[in-house]
Structures are given as structure tokens and as C-alpha cells.
Amino acid sequence: MDIKAIKTEDDYIQALKRLEVKFHAPIDSEEGKEAEVLSILIEKYEEKNYPFDVSDLI
């Protein structure tokens, strides 16, 4: 498992691609743990760079 912080848009895209490959891995496996960490890093990057406001939906 070689995971690093997501700091750029390119890092973000690469993390999404990697998560797509690992997404259905069993939770207790190394791939499942990698998918969990990737999803957390992706979520934090999105919160910081793509803020979502409920009023945008109206």
C-alpha cells in the first residue's frame, strides 16, 4: 500500500482511479484497508476544494 496525501488535482484523479480498482475489496483485506484510507483522503480533498452549499441546489 503506497498512499500519499492528495495535494493536487492530478493526485486527486489518480486516487479516484486507484479507489475504483480497490472499491469492492473485502473490508478486512489489505486492499479493503487501502480503499478505506483512499476514500477518507478523497473526501477531505473534496471538502476543501469543492465546497458544497445546500443553497446551491435551489
Image (spheres, grey):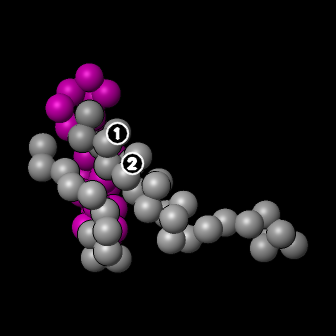
Residue 19 in the image: above or below residue 1: below
Q: Is residue 49 magenta?
A: no
Are the residues flagged by discs 2 and 1 in contact, CB closer than 8 Å?
Answer: yes
Q: Is residue 19 magenta?
A: yes
Amino acid type at mark 2: Ser
40 or 30: nearer the viewer:
40
> 10 Å neighbourhood of mark 1: few (<14), some, or many (≥20)?
some
Helix, strand or loop for disc 2: helix
Residue 31 in the image: above or below residue 21: above
Tell me where residue 54 sits by quadrant: bottom right
Amino acid type at mark 1: Glu
Q: Which residue is mark 2?
A: 39
Q: Which residue is mark 1?
A: 36
Q: Residue at x 27, y 34 (%)?
A: 32
List the single residue furthest toward the right: 58
Q: Residue at x 83, y 69 (%)?
A: 55
Indicate the position of residue 42 as horizontal and vertical percent values.
Answer: 40, 56
Helix, strand or loop for disc 1: helix
Q: Residue at x 28, y 29 (%)?
A: 26
| Magenta highlight range | 12-32
Q: Is residue 40 among the parts visible in the rendering? A: yes
Residue 19 as seen in the image, left or right of residue 46: left
